[in-house]
Amino acid sequence: MVTSTPRARTIVGLEIHVQLATRTKMFCGCAVRTDAPPNSCVCPVCLGHPGSLPVINRRAVEFAVRAGLALNCTIATFTKWDRKSYYYPDMPKNYQISQYDLPICAKGHFDIPTSDGPKRVRIRRAHLEEDAGKNLHDVPGCTLVDLNRAGTPLLEIVTEPDIASAEEAYTFATELQRLMVHLGVSEGIMQRGHMRFEPNVNLLIEHDGREYRTPISEVKNLNSFRSVRGAIAFEEARQLEAWLEDRNYVMGSRPNENRGWLDDRGVTEYQRVKEAAHDYRYFPDPDLVPVTIEPAWLDQLRATLPEAPVARRQRFVETLGLSPKDADTIADHRPTADLFEAVLAAGARVEIAGKQFVNVWLTLANSAGVSVDALGVSPAAMAELAVITDEGVINRSAVGQIAEAMVAETRKQGNVETGGGGPSPRALAESLGLVQVRDTGATEAWVAEVFARNEQAVRDALANPKKAAAAAGFLRGQVMKLSGGKADPKLVGQLIEERLRNS
Ligand code: ZN
Ligand code: MN
């Protein structure tokens, strides 16, 4: 019998639960908080008391639409609510309010960067639902239930199985998180469980001219990007091995299964056979009215949709001419990117402003442990610093010192909160004595003094070709030092060269 080596292709679809950044819950007025004492943000609605009536949170609907638009989805003009029945101690109603056959968003796509260029992942649907509470197992011998999270709005996003590797899933997850934060629809803090990923993984195996599909594993509740990548990579290996051992390990012969990820061991483990939709006995929620979305409101949301981070990075590189690395750094955080664009709009040249933004402002912000916009320096003041550098009013070595003084002054004046302030860098350069001296006479006098004081270096520069460059550099440094950093380095270089030539 002739056999070839089996070739396996990985097929992944992702389900993502995104916690929306509303102040209150999906169907009641209770606050959404993670820092409150257990069971303090609850009411008859989210506790599921009989006779209580849910009311739809308009803001959650708006966030879902924003996310759907950014994912290029079709937004339903008519959408309704369904009860998804299941029993858990952390869900006292015994059903979850969700959307079954008429999700608010459907048929979109999201392009992610890969080493082979952009890759399109289709979005099957995105629907609104409420979260369950939390079972706590930290007290021995019993399970405690905290219902503060019960009723928190979630957007469940479901992709088509277009993702072909653990690495692509990792990229998709990180880019989606960036997008949600950028849109302001989620805080996207992974450590707080704001985004939970559930990859559906199986393999298409080609062997001896036949195709085999392994059963789908759904890995439940992954709350880090690393675990998304790890769980998929583990499933790829596990499923191939399972099929090699048992050729009946294929869809139809073996059930799809739910698996859990054990982070400390880096493996998935079997939990149970995957539920089918009919297990949930979905039916329309009789307590909630359907939602009709007005075209005018939709147009308004569409018009105010911010540019996606991926598109912005691309524009920063292609239109503004930033390096991909600088574009990544600046576009990663929306207020930072907005501030950068405001600096350019205020008249700074991108060549200077880009470098200053990354090397000076971001560095100052990082060491203060805040984002650049929180430094409180206005875009006009940042632009002015770039302009006076460009004009040669100050030299590049003085930029950091002036920027530092701008931040300190802004703090002193109490302008950090308004972001409207900060002293003029031009005035600061003057008061700090950092205005560049481009007066040839004054610079010549400094050069003459340095030549007189450093005869050996001058002789080296003249006589020894091996030492000439180093000696000239040394002399230049001495002149800059003597001038207190105010000399124009270019002019100094020219004058030193001239003087050596004429010696
Ligand atoms: Zn409530
Ligand atoms: Mn769900």
Image (spheres, rainbow, N blue to C red):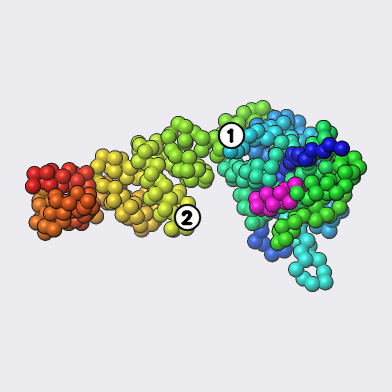
223 in magenta: no
Q: Compared with residue 378, is residue 35 higher up or lower down, i.e. above or below?
A: below
Looking at the image, the residue that sits furthest to the right is 253
Q: Report the residue marked by disc 2.
A: 370
Tell me residue 122's x, y (percent).
70, 33
Task: Find out if the beta carbon at label 2 lies less than 8 Å from the nearest ligand 1 atom.
Answer: no
Residue found 74% across the figure and 58% down from its top: 262
Is residue 75 in sight in this rendering? no
Q: Compared with residue 70, is residue 201 higher up or lower down, i.e. above or below?
A: below
Identify the mark at residue 117; answer none if there is no mark.
1
Q: Nearer the viewer, residue 118 or 310?
A: 118
Tell me residue 43's x, y (percent).
76, 56
Extent of the magenta region: 224-236
| Disc 1 element | strand
Residue found 85% across the figure and 49% down from its top: 245
Tell me residue 20's x, y (percent).
66, 46
- Location of residue 215 (image quadrant): top right
Is residue 14 in sight in this rendering? yes
Tell me residue 81's x, y (percent).
80, 39
Of the numbered discs 2 and 1, the one sitting upstream in the chain is: 1
**Dominant secondary structure of the residues highlighted in magenta in the image:** helix
Q: Are marks 2 and 1 in contact (CB under 8 Å)?
A: no
**Left-right relation of 502 to 218:** left
**Left-right relation of 363 to 442:** right
234 in magenta: yes
| Disc 2 element | loop
